[in-house]
Amino acid sequence: MRTWPALILAPLIALGSISLGYALVTPVCERGSVWLLHALILTCLFITVATTTLAWTRKGEFLGLVATGCGAFFSLIIALQWLAQFVVTPCMH
């Protein structure tokens, strides 16, 4: 039961992070503060790392290994999305 959140929630949270990040760009640029985007990314990253850690406890099984890899991959995707926010500002015109 500990493997399913990393298999199902991690991809959904990564997709939600990208979608909500795009949706929040306009309000963030109007206010001039990007902390909301950073808070969103960190929250999503924390949840995916937590689900990956749960799957890691079952790494001796095949499904646990697959779930750990899936969770780690989508955690990396979210971390790279956060890195992109430092390189390219969201309010670039």
Image (cartoon, helix red, strand yellow):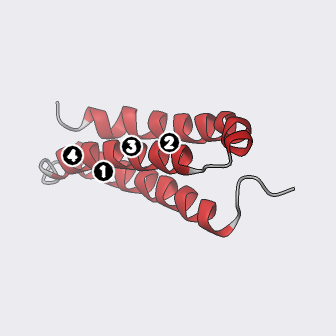
Which of discs 1 and 3 lies nearer the camera? The answer is 3
Residue type at mark 3 is: Thr
Query: On screen, 49 above or below 28?
Result: below
Q: Earlier in the sequence, mark 1 or mark 4?
A: 1
User: Label 2 to label 4, Cα distance in Å?
Assistant: 17 Å
81 vs 60, nearest the viewer? 81
The correct choice, above or below, for 13 with respect to 78 in the image is above
At x 69% / y 35%, what residue is drawn? 27
Check disc 3: other Cα within 10 Å, few if <14, some if 14-19, many if 20+: some
Q: Which residue is mark 2?
A: 14
Position of 25 compared to 42: left or right?
Answer: right
Which label belongs to residue 55?
Answer: 4
Image coordinates of residue 54 in percent, x first then y, are 18, 44
Q: Disc 1 marks which amino acid?
A: Val
Q: CA distance from mark 1 to mark 4?
A: 10 Å
60 lies left or right of 47: left
Quadrant showing the C terminus? bottom right
Q: Nearer the viewer, mark 1 or mark 4?
A: 1
Q: Nearer the viewer, residue 44 or 92?
A: 92
Residue at x 23%, y 38% (from the top left corner): 3
Q: Crowding at label 4, few (<14), some or many (≥20) Cα neighbours within 10 Å?
A: many
Label for residue 43?
A: 3
The residue sitting at 49% across, 52% down in the picture is 78
Q: Which mark is residue 49?
A: 1
**Residue 25, position as x, y percentages in the image:** 69, 41
* CB atoms of marks 1 and 4 within 8 Å: no
The answer to which of marks 4 and 3 sits earlier in the sequence is 3
Dot 3 or dot 2: first in sequence order is: 2
Comparing labels 2 and 4, the label whose residue is closer to the camera: 2
Disc 4 to disc 3, how far (Cα)? 19 Å
Q: Nearer the viewer, mark 3 or mark 2?
A: 3
- Identify the element where label 3 is drawn: helix
